[in-house]
Image: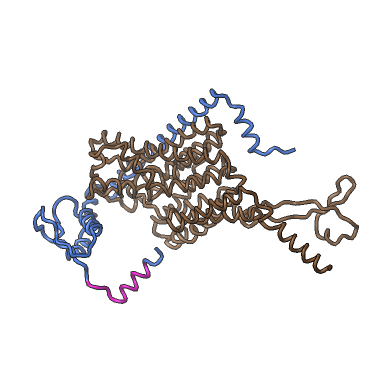
Chain colours: A blue, B brown
Amino acid sequence: MVLNGIGLTQFAAAELSLAEKGIASAKVILTGFVVVFSVLLLLIGVIKLYSFIVGMVQGSGGSKKKKNKEQTPPVKKKVTAEVSEPVSPKQNPPVEEGIPEEVVAVIAAAVASVYGKSGRAKIKSIKKAGGRSAWANAGVLDNTRPF
Amino acid sequence: MEILTGFLDAIKGIYESSGLVSLGWQNYVMIGISCFLLYLAIKKQYEPLLLLPIAFGMLLVNLYPEIMAAPHISLVEIQSANDPAAVGHTVQEIGGKIYYENPTYGGLLYYLYQGVKLGIYPPLIFLGIGCMTDFGPLIANPKSLILGAAAQIGIFITFTGAIFLGFTESEAGAIGIIGGADGPTAIYVTTKLAPHLLGSIAIAAYSYMALVPIIQPPIMKALTTKKERGVVMEQLRPVSKLEKILFPIIVVILIAIFLPDAAPLVGMLMLGNLFKESGVVERIAKAAQNELMNIITIFLGTTVGATASGANFLKLDTLKIIALGLIAFCMGTAFGVLFGKIMYKLTGGKINPLIGSAGVSAVPMAARVSQKVGQQENPGNFLLMHAMGPNVAGVIGSAVAAGVLLNVVG
């Protein structure tokens, strides 16, 4: 007669005393806690180390500044249609009717993430752009249909 | 008259082989449950990509249990020396009688289920997830790995609860992993530790993942103050391409060396990520995250659902697993937030503790919940990218926790 593995483990479980259960639990909690934290702390150290090395190799802070400069101009070009010099810090930008608050928030977030909090840019107004051409619509449809 | 008898016999035979005779009450209850799950998947859209195949697999196996039947060989006695039925079959002699081996093949879902049973599908799902994951926020803020680790504590505490509720160590390990909120990891660990509980554990894990937006916010709000929830975090630094390419290679080397049991899951996750970040195998990356992942999802969902046959599922143990799973999940969220609070204190208020709850995996739903709860306090606060760090760290953390469980109780 062949006993299957499940039957055997269940038989073993019935034999576990309260103390044995406590020991088994403590063992797993302690090992789990220590190993998971150690491995992830090790990863933190390694990520920091190699980020530092990569930063050094790529010219450290200098290259970061360069990168920021490289990244900002093209974005700036796109945003200039909507972003210009500050009107007044406390004044809310005029928003065209029919544009939901969420969209305004997203635009504000995009501008803030590119320019930061330095106050270099303010949203002057938010308006809907003119309708897309048939070709542009076809392109958008093609890209968004899977979702 | 003979025709009428033959007709009645045929009708009787069809009736006797139909589900009306062969199905038990448990099967009918499970059919009801699967229809309810189908409703949740289609109407409420709770994780439909997984819940729909799971619910349909459950429906199929309870209507036609043979679809999951394992292949077997029966012995049939040979009536005469020239018995035509025995031709081509292996013959055995037992007790002076001669039998031939008559093989019966397994059901369709039995064969598809082998990918689950042998632990093949979950790592392949991780391959696809790796192709879709951006580890940039984690590399930019490696401290978020601590939150990914903290959210795994629930797994180990639930293990204790399960042990004291009468489950074996292996079963308790499989139940605890529900707290990792990672479907493939839960399935992978369960197939290795307690395959007989797969149906209930998988269903509990995916149900709670679908319910993340309902379960997490009350815990997050209860454990944080208004001031803490309103913290606006500094923008993350840009991460270079080289750092992103090196990340999967370094992680896999470290984890595979220190915790080999986690290597299949983490290895596939990182391979997928390297496909994405290297930028040189775009076709493969697309195939892994679209076609391959979708095919595996169909097989995995349907066959996991098919393990929930009435006799297997309708037990007191299932209710215990569902309750323990919820505890594991809540504990994971709570510990993530509590560690977030510690980091808030240590950094002088620079870290919003709400991102801690995203340390349970459930990518990207848990991060979205952090964002949503944060915005309720301060509509101008955008925590999403900050929460993605602990969120992807949670995927690594739950894979590491899985490795620990496999090693300690496996």
Please give the name of the residue rendered at 37% of the width and 70% of the height, measured from the top-left corner.
Answer: A142
Which of the 4 image quadrants contains residue A47?
A: top left
Q: Main secondary structure of the magenta part?
A: helix
Please give the name of the residue rendered at 46% of the width and 60% of the height, measured from the top-left corner.
Answer: B290
What range is drawn magenta here? A130-143
Please give the name of the residue rendered at 51% of the width and 50% of the height, measured from the top-left corner.
Answer: B122
The answer to which of A67 and A53 lies nearer the viewer is: A67
Residue found at the very far left of the displayed protein: A88
The answer to which of B193 and B203 lies nearer the viewer is: B203
Residue A71 seen anywhere in this rendered image of the structure: no
Which of the 4 image quadrants contains residue B107?
A: bottom right
Which quarter of the image is occupied by the C terminus of chain B? top right
Up/down of B132 relative to B311, above or below: below
Q: Is residue B205 magenta?
A: no
Up/down of A50 relative to B52, above or below: above
Give the number of marks.
0
Left or right relative to B160: residue A112: left
Q: Position of residue A121 (x, y in %)?
A: 15, 56
Please give the name of the residue rendered at 80% of the width and 67% of the height, measured from the top-left corner.
Answer: B4
Q: Position of residue B45 (x, y in %)?
A: 43, 56
Q: Position of residue A75 (x, y in %)?
A: 22, 61
